[in-house]
Image: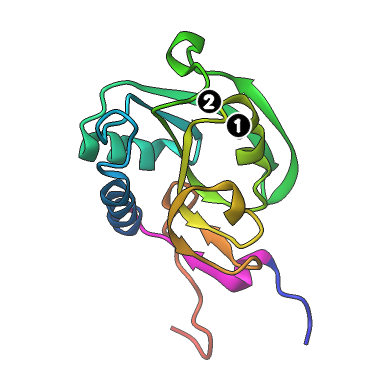
Amino acid sequence: MSERLPHEKGFHISWDQIHRDSRALAWRLDGKGPDDGAWRAIVAITRGGMAPAMIIARELDIRTVDTISVKSYDHQSQSEAEVLNSPNEDMMGDGTGVLIIDDLVDSGKTLELVRSLYPNAHFATVYAKPKGRPQVDSYITEVSQDTWIFFPWDMAMQYVKPYRGRD
């Protein structure tokens, strides 16, 4: 059997699905913060963590939301993770009471880098792959390492030719 291309073992996520799964993650995180169950802030890992972070912030009534920009992909190729922009230092401290949100943990390199900066933060992703799962504290759905997740912000609707025959 030949090797599959990333899109051949794809897990397609719709806007409805990311919304449902992000709300489920919020429910899992509710009451788990260090301040009588509350969280003081959310930091979204850009860009994939922004939509889930927005939904979680709304569900948990968290008004302090910031971002950390980490680049670890060039299209579908993973590269060395690097921080491009950091959240407010006074707000972050060592991360205590802060939720770090991303859409997916794949290899774990992005979360490993961010965890080294904020060791006491709580790391949560909507989806997790086995290799990166040790870097995340909470997640909703696990997929196999060789699955490529197609997020709605990366997709566009277009005509697809029938598998067999003509229109």
* Residue at figure coordinates x 60%, y 40% from the top left: 111
Image location (x, y in percent) of residue 61: 20, 31
Please tell me which of labels 2 and 1 falls first in the chain.
2
Residue type of the residue flagged with mark 2: Ile
Residue 48 vertical placement versus 116 (above, below): below
Residue 74, above or below 144: above
Secondary element at image label 2: strand
Mark pair 2, 1: CA separation: 8 Å
x then y, percent, for residue 156: 44, 54
- Can you tell which quarter of the image residue 24 is in? bottom left
Q: Considering the image in quadrants, where does the N terminus appear? A: bottom right
Query: Do the residues under discs 2 and 1 have CB atoms within 8 angstroms?
Result: yes
Left or right: 138 in relation to 75: left
Residue 114: which disc? 1
For badge 1, the amino acid type reads Val
For the residue pair 3 and 58, the one nearer the viewer reads as: 58
Q: Which residues are magenta?
A: 6-15
Residue 68 is marked as 2
Crowd around label 2: few <14 · some 14–19 · many ≥20 (10 Å)? many
Mark 2 or mark 1: which is in front? Answer: 1
Image coordinates of residue 12 in percent, x first then y, are 46, 64
Q: Residue at x 48, y 25 (%)?
A: 95
Q: Is residue 138 magenta?
A: no
- Relative to 159, is 148 on the left or the right? right
Residue 101 versus residue 167 in the image, above or below: above
Pinpoint residue 93: horizontal percent, then vertical percent: 50, 16
Q: Secondary structure at mark 1?
A: helix
Colour setting: rainbow
Q: Residue at x 33, y 59 (%)?
A: 17
User: Tag 1: Cα neighbours inside 10 Å, few (<14), some, or many (≥20)?
Assistant: many
Q: Residue at x 32, y 45 (%)?
A: 29
